[in-house]
Amino acid sequence: MTDYILAWQCVGCGKIEAPQPCIGVCRDRKILMVSKDEHDAVAAQLQHARSLVRMAIDMLGRVAHSTPKQGQWERSYRALQEQARASIAALEAGPS
């Protein structure tokens, strides 16, 4: 679970204060902050998820745009299966 820190950021100069607003010289707005470690972990997960989606799109593109030669459908199908297996193995291996 992500812990948020309630802070106040000045709309003019950008200064950040927590846990309460400043004495009133600035015009502050509430913001929520997370720790750098949590942000980095989520950013890494997002990058991995994007790579998974890219790999899936590439594989689907090969399936969608392949047209086997006459009498070669099984050979093409088997090649696509091998590519799909390799993609799944890479996905299961995790981020590289």
Image (tube, helix red, strand yellow):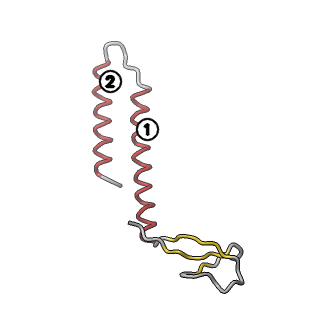
Residue occupying image coordinates x 44% and y 55%: 46
Q: In the rendered structure, which amino acid carries the disc numbered 2? A: Ser
71, 5: nearer the viewer: 5
Q: Is residue 32 above or below residue 46?
A: below
Q: Mark on residue 76?
A: 2
Q: Mark on residue 8?
A: none
Q: Earlier in the sequence, mark 1 or mark 2?
A: 1
Residue occupying image coordinates x 31% and y 47%: 90
Residue 85 at x, y = what percent?
28, 38
Residue occupied by mark 1: 57
92, 23: nearer the viewer: 23
Residue occupying image coordinates x 33% and y 41%: 87
Of the 4 image quadrants, the one containing the N terminus is bottom left
Using a 10 Å C-alpha cutoff, classify the residue at mark 2 as few (fewer than 14 neighbours), some (14 to 19) or many (20 or more): some
Give left or right: position of 96 versus 27. left
Q: Secondary structure at mark 2?
A: helix
Task: State how far apart marks 1 and 2 are (Cα).
Answer: 18 Å
Give left or right: position of 4 versus 85. right
Q: Is residue 45 above or below residue 67?
A: below
Tag nearer the camera, 1 or 2? 1
